[in-house]
C-alpha cells in the first residue's frame, strides 16, 4: 500500500500553499495533459471566434453595399490598408484580451482552463497581479507561437520557391522543442513564463454544491454548541478582511483538517486583536465567516465592494 501511494501521480502533484497570513492551503499541480488541452481549447475558441466575426462582418458589409454601385475591390489602396490594420488590431486585442481578462478575473482561468478544471495561481500565496498575468502570456507567444509561425512561413516559402528551409528552420525547431519540453524538467510542471511571472497552474476541485455555511451551526446561531459562547464581532474587526479572504475561509471550513483550522483561528484572532483560546476553533470561524459574509453582502447592495484586505 505504501509503495502504491508513493507512486500515485496525484500525490506527487500535491503541494501546500502558505498564504501571507500563515494559512496552509492544500493544492494539486495541474497535469501537463490538462494544461495542453486547455491551451488547445482556448486557441480553437479564439480562432473560430475571430473567423466567425470576420465572416459576419464581410456579410454585413456586402449587404450594405449591395445596390449602391460601390465595389470594395475598387476602393483606394489607402482605404484597403486601413481596413487591414483595423482587422489586425482586432485580432491582436482579442488574442491578448482573451487571456488577460479571464485570468485576472476571480476564477483565474480562461474558458479552456475552466473546462479542464485548472486555474492560474501565484506561487507565493499572494494575489495574482496584472504584471504576472501579462508576463506569462507574453512569454507563451515567445515559447510556442512565434517559432511555430516562423516554421509555417518558412515551409510555405520553401514550397513556393522549391528551396530548402535552411538552418533557420532547425533553429526554430530546436527553440520550439526546448520550451515545449521545459515543463517536463521540473517537478511543478512550470513553463518558462510561469518561472518568470512567479505563477503555477493548479487544479480546481470540482465539488458538488454544498449547503450554505451561513445557515449551519455557529454560523447561523452565533453560539457554540460546545461551550455555549456567543461570538459577536464589531465593524472594525470585520473590516480587516474582504471577499478573497472570505472565500479562502469558506474553503478551509469545508475542506481543511482540524489542525489547519487551529492555525487559521490563531491567525484571525491575532489580526482582530482577540486572545486565541483553544478547543472551540470551528465555532469561532463559522461565526466569523457568517458575520463577515453578511457585512460584505450588505455593502455590495449599496455599490461598495471590498475585494480583499488590501482594498
Image (cartoon, rainbow, N blue to C red):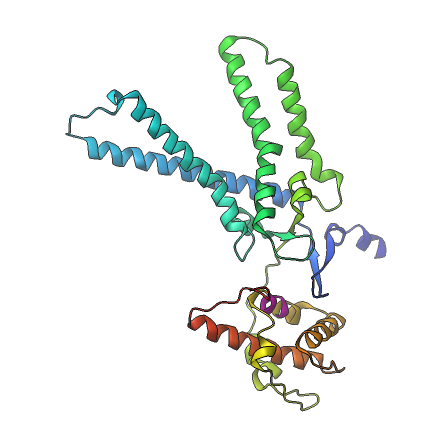
Q: How many marks?
A: 0
Locate residue 51: give its quadrant. Answer: top left
Q: Quadrant where the C terminus lies?
A: bottom right
Which residue is situated farthest in the bottom direction here? 228
- Residue 290 at least partly seen: no
**Residue in the picture at 48% in, 44% down:** 98
Task: Give percent across and percent down for residue 13.
Answer: 73, 51
Vertical side of 10 occupied by 136: above or below: above
* Side of 69 relative to 226 (left or right): left
Q: Residue at x 53, y 58 (%)?
A: 106
The quadrant holding residue 273 is: bottom right
Q: Quick check: can you spot residue 157? A: yes
Q: Which residues are magenta?
A: 245-249
Corner quadrant of residue 171: top right
Of the pair 229 and 211, the residue shown nearer to us: 229
Q: Locate residue 172, reporting x and y percent.
A: 63, 23
Question: In which quadrant is the N terminus drawn?
Answer: bottom right
Amino acid at each position: 500500500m505504501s509503495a502504491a501511494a508513493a507512486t500515485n501521480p496525484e500525490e506527487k502533484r500535491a503541494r501546500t500553499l502558505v498564504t501571507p497570513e500563515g494559512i496552509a492551503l492544500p493544492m494539486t499541480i495541474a497535469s501537463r495533459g490538462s494544461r495542453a488541452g486547455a491551451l488547445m481549447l482556448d486557441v480553437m475558441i479564439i480562432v473560430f471566434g475571430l473567423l466567425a466575426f470576420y465572416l459576419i462582418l464581410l456579410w454585413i458589409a456586402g449587404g450594405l453595399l449591395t445596390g449602391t454601385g460601390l465595389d470594395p475591390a475598387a476602393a483606394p489602396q489607402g482605404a484597403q490598408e486601413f481596413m487591414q490594420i483595423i482587422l489586425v488590431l482586432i485580432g491582436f486585442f482579442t488574442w491578448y484580451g482573451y487571456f488577460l481578462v479571464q485570468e485576472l478575473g476571480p476564477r483565474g482561468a480562461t474558458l479552456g482552463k475552466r473546462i479542464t478544471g485548472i486555474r492560474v495561481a501565484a506561487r507565493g500565496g499572494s494575489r495574482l497581479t496584472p504584471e504576472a498575468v501579462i508576463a506569462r502570456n507574453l512569454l507563451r507567444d515567445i515559447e510556442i507561437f512565434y517559432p511555430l509561425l516562423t516554421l509555417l512561413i518558412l515551409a510555405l516559402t520553401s514550397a513556393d520557391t522549391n528551396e530548402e528551409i535552411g538552418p533557420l528552420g532547425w533553429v526554430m525547431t530546436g527553440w520550439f522543442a526546448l520550451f515545449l519540453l521545459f515543463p517536463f524538467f521540473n517537478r511543478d510542471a512550470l513553463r518558462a513564463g510561469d518561472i518568470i511571472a512567479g505563477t503555477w497552474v493548479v487544479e480546481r476541485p470540482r465539488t458538488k454544491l454544498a449547503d450554505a455555511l451561513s445557515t449551519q451551526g455557529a454560523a447561523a446561531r452565533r453560539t457554540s454548541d460546545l461551550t455555549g459562547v456567543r461570538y459577536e464581532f464589531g465593524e472594525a474587526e470585520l473590516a480587516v478582511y474582504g471577499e478573497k479572504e472570505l472565500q479562502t475561509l469558506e474553503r478551509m471550513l469545508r475542506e481543511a483538517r482540524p489542525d489547519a483550522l487551529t492555525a487559521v483561528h490563531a491567525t484571525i484572532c491575532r489580526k482582530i486583536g482577540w486572545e486565541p483560546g483553544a478547543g472551540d476553533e470551528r465555532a469561532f470561524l463559522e461565526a466569523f465567516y457568517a458575520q463577515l459574509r453578511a457585512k460584505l453582502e450588505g455593502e455590495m447592495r449599496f455599490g461598495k465592494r471590498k475585494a480583499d484586505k488590501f482594498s
